[in-house]
Amino acid sequence: MTQHFIELTAPKRLMAKVAFARSAGIAGDVVLVLPRTPDEEIGRVHRLVAAARKALGAESIPFQIVEIDKAIRLASSGDPSRALVIDLDLLHQENIGLLESACSSSSQVIGYKLHQNPSKTTAAIFARGDSNSALAGTVVRRLTEAGVVDRTSFVHVTHAGESATVDDSVLEAYGKVKAELPQARLAIEQAEERVESAIEHCSLQYGLLVLGLPQHLRKHSVTEHLLAQVTAGLLRATVVFVYARGAEVEQLSATTKTIEPWILKNTFSQDEFADIDRLLQAKRDRHVSISLVLPALNEAKTVGQVIDAFKGPLMEERPLLDEIILMDSDSGDNTREIAAARGIPVYVHQQVRPDLGTYAGKGEAMWKALFVAKGDILVFVDTDLSNPHPSLVTGLVGPLLLDERLNFIKGFYRRPVRVVNEFVEVGGGRVTELTARPLLNLWYPELGGLFQPLAGTIAARAGILRELHFLTGYGVEIGHVIEYVHKYGIEGLAQSELGELIHRNQPLDALSKMSFQVLEAFFRLSHGLMAPGMADRMNGVLRQPFLSDTGFTLYQTRLGQETRPPVSSVPPLNPPASVHQRRDTKKPT
């Protein structure tokens, strides 16, 4: 069964949409929708409905005054074999995520935006995945048989400077289209900058564009951008988006093909960057400065040795680092005094930009550090390490200094857990293995190659970090990974192996709190996984019942995190002086 949602509009426009849908073989059972409560008097609305029914020659066509998101959810909640056809005039930029929920619960979804009545026009197919390509070919074949389309191209977009050759996945998709349209030709379109710009340019050459619709829309920024352009009426062509269940299964091999070369190309080892003179030369050639940021909260036992591990070898002996700063979270021990005695600037994050307010949490400390750190490259290293070593920093900054295509480096390392008096090897950490890794593999399989997505030991270009949101708690790391890939793609993300690092181990109840914040961050930043408004309804309190010999206790901890905006969007203010004034006020070069 196919349901066809069409905006209630003037009969002439309505007839044009239905005629196009019939030509494409997607007409289905029409449902007229007025996507808002009308300001006009109800009698005028009923006259418009009557005129529409008369024009369509069907007096029994259903009519709804309902928000389109509710209409789609109701239609999708029934038979999962149902197909949905959606007039994209019903959508706007804020609710294009509705197509994602439709794809997750329907066998087929087709959305269309009629630019004008197409006749004897040319068509361009961009669909990928066997199922989407086959459906796209079927739709265009029917339009060809109806005389709407006379020529079809299967368009493959490449970036400027890339080889014009096509890989097997493109040829497989082209083969699916050729099975429906033997006359379809393969065309190569070069994108000067963004892929979506090349597709937008094609709207000036072709009268009809047909694109595949991914099931998880928010992970495909190109499709999301194009949908926003289409719903805003900015493309000068009729556009059809197609989704057929099965496409996401067939993309499995394509995802694997993406992950494997990424791991090979973007995974490094600290041993590759042992030549500090080479790194210094690259730093001079690129005219960049490097800041090491050490977030801390009550780390008096280890903070001194952490600073010593980097300050002597990487600042005093060889000036790879231009500054080391401690970003303290108002420690109750003498963490700040130990750091100040070693001559590094010390800040209390609650005192940095007090005009912006303050929150507890590691992510808040990292965000506040962006207001005081001066480097072009920022390195963050935890201060609870009991075995810090200089190669930890060189292993993180090396890829950024030697490979300009990279922007964000995640550290990974062997991290044993102390059991009684022995260390036992585990994988990426308990929260990673039990919470973060399953989530990423379920919803972001392209990130399945990350060894430790929650590692707080990172290096990144400062300009990139200033464009990212910061969750104030332990969700900051997974939030960065998701947002970075969503904004910039996976190619600029890399990981570097840092040997063995021994952290202070957390008790199980503390790990529960970390997991709570990781889950909250994941769902808050993974747009499209929840219905609109659901993220704001998430509970921010963790309740943990404990049973003892004397009875039970219910502990309640408020763990909800705030989301800090990109620093680039925050109005500037003169930076505060450090708590312990710098001994060396020379700016990084």
Image (tube, rainbow, N blue to C red):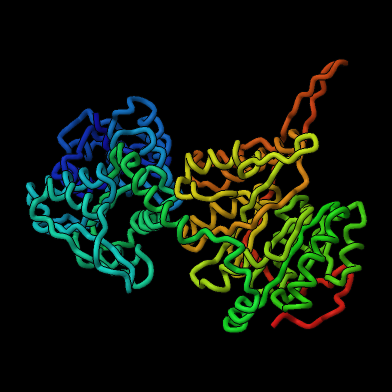
Residue 561 shows in this picture:
yes
Q: Is residue 22 left or right of residue 92?
A: left
Depth check, front residue: 235 or 11: 235
- What residue is shown at x 72% (from left), y 35% (from top)? 541
- What residue is shown at x 68% (from left), y 69% (from top)? 571
Depth check, front residue: 373 or 162: 162
Rendering coords of residue 532 (x, y %): 51, 42
Depth check, front residue: 503 or 567: 503
Depth check, front residue: 224 or 230: 224
Q: Is residue 397 left or right of residue 494?
A: right
- What residue is shown at x 79% (from left), y 25% (from top)? 554
Rendering coords of residue 344 (x, y %): 83, 70
Quadrant where the C terminus sits is: bottom right
Quadrant where the N terminus sits is: top left
Residue 558 shows in this picture:
no
Seen in the picture, residue 8 relative to 398 is either above or below; the reply is above
Q: Is residue 124 left or right of residue 554?
A: left
Rendering coords of residue 465 (x, y %): 61, 64
Rendering coords of residue 547 (x, y %): 80, 20
- What residue is shown at x 61% (from left), y 76% (from top)? 279
Seen in the picture, residue 469 relative to 41 is either above or below; the reply is below
Q: Number of marks in the image?
A: 0
Q: Quadrant of residue 191?
A: bottom left
Q: Is residue 417 left or right of residue 237?
A: right
